[in-house]
Amino acid sequence: MLGVTRLLNGTVSPSDALRYGRHTSRGPAHLLHYSEDKKPVVVWNCTQTCNLKCMHCYASSRNKQYPGELTTEEAKGLMDQLAEFKIPTVLFSGGEPLMRPDLFEVVAYAREQGLRAVLSTNGTLISQEVAEKIRDAGFTYVGISLDGIGDVHDSIRGTKGSFEDALEGIRRVRDVGIRVGLRFTIHAKNRDEVEGIFQLMRDEKIPRCCIYHLAYAGRGEKLQRYDLEPHETREALDFIFDRAQELHEQGIELDLLTVDNHADNVYLYQRVLKDHPDRADEVYEMLSWNGGNQSGIAIAAIDPKGNVHPDQFSWHQTFGNVKERPFADIWQDRSDPFLAILKDRKGSLKGRCSVCKWLPICNGNLRVRAESYFDDALAPDPGCYLTDEECGILPGTPEATVAAEFPVPAQEALVGAEGAAS
C-alpha cells in the first residue's frame, strides 16, 4: 500500500514515523506502512457468502452458504489469538461481511480485546440501522467498493442498482460519524472512470480512496486479459498523481493510496526526484521502510474456515489453520518453505525481479500475479510496467540475460512511450 498523497505532497516525513518508534502498536494507522516490527495487518475473510457477483472477486463469492466457516466461538478465539500477537488491525472482509449474522458480536468482542477493526464491504446492505450497528460495534473505518459510476459499477458488480445502494451506504456511514473511504480496482473495463471517482469524492466529501491494481485470483484470474497495458498503467498513475497534487494545492486533502502494484513505489519516487529533488532522499527512506510488497510479512489473510494465507489473493497457499495452531505460531514458523521465501525473498526471485535495482522498495511485487501468468510464484510480476532500462538492466550485460528468462508481457508497448525512462 502506497500513501500517494502524503508522500507526493510532503505531508508525511521520516520524523513522523520515528516519533512513534516505527512500532505498530504506537503509531496511527497511516504510519503502519513504515513500521519496523512489521506485525501484520490481518484480513479476515469472515464469510465467503456475498449478495453480488463481481467479475474480479478474488474469493469467487456467490450468494449461497458455504460449509465449514468459523463458528462464533471459534471467531472469538481467533480474535484472542490476534490480540495476543498484538496485530495492529483486523480487516473484516468477505465475501460480504455484513451477511455474517454474528459480525457485530464478533467485532465488539475484538474491540474489547484491544483490536482496531475496519470493515471492507460492497456497501449495498447498509441501512440506517446497519450504519448505527457499524458505529456501535466499534469499527473505526469502513472501505466501500466502487468500480465506476452508475451502470459501469453495476455491470462489473453483476447487479442492477448496486451503485445507488452503495452510494446510500457511503452516506449513511459518513452521517453516523464513521470515517469512510472508497476501494476502486482499476482495469480496462473502468479505466475511464477514475475522473468520475475523484469528482464523486469531492461531491460526497469522501476523504479517502484506495486504488487497487488487478490481482489475478479467483474470478479476477479470468479477467487478466483486461489488465492495463504498461503505458495505460502509467497514464492512470500520472492522472492520479496530478490530481493528488492539484487538490493539495487547492487546500483539499484527500487521502489517495495505490495498492497491489509496488512498481508504483518506484514511479512515485521518480516523480519526486524530478519535481522535488530536495525531498527525494527522505521519500526513498520512507519507501524503503514501506518495503514494497508485504505478503507474508506485514499482511496476512485468514479465510472463512480459519486457514492462514500470505495475502487475501493466495488462498491456494496455506500455512496452517487457527483452529489447530495459534496464529502467532503459524505466522512465525519458517519451516514452511514458501513462507520463509516470502519473508526474505531477495535471493529467490527470478528473471527481472532478481536483478532489478528497485528491489529494496518493491520487493518483487505481487507473487500471485506471477504465479497465475507464468505458473511460477518466483517469476517476475507481469503487472510491472517499468522498462528494463528503468530497472537498471542494460542490453548486453549479464543482468539482461537473467532478465530475459521471463519477459514482461506487452513490454514492447513501452517503446517510445512518453516518459518511459523519466
Image (tube, rainbow, N blue to C red):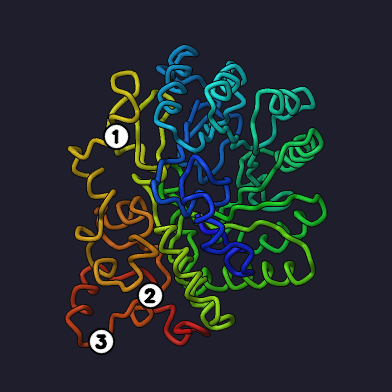
Going from N to C along the chain, the mark reached first, 3 or 1, is 1
Q: Nearer the viewer, mark 2 or mark 1?
A: 1
Q: Secondary structure at mark 2?
A: helix
Going from N to C along the chain, the mark reached first, 2 or 1, is 1
- Whole-angstrom CA distance, mark 3 to mark 1, is 39 Å
Pointer 1: residues within 10 angstroms few (<14), some, or many (20+)? some
- Tags 2 and 3 in contact by the CB under 8 Å rule? no
Q: Which mark is residue 411?
A: 2
Which residue is disc 1 drawn over?
A: 318
Q: Residue at x 46, y 40 (%)?
A: 41
- Whole-angstrom CA distance, mark 2 to mark 3, is 14 Å
Q: Secondary structure at mark 1?
A: loop
Q: How many marks?
A: 3
Q: Nearer the viewer, mark 2 or mark 3?
A: 3
The disc labelled 3 sits on which kind of residue? Pro
The disc labelled 2 sits on which kind of residue? Gln
- Tags 3 and 1 in contact by the CB under 8 Å rule? no
Pointer 3: residues within 10 angstroms few (<14), some, or many (20+)? few
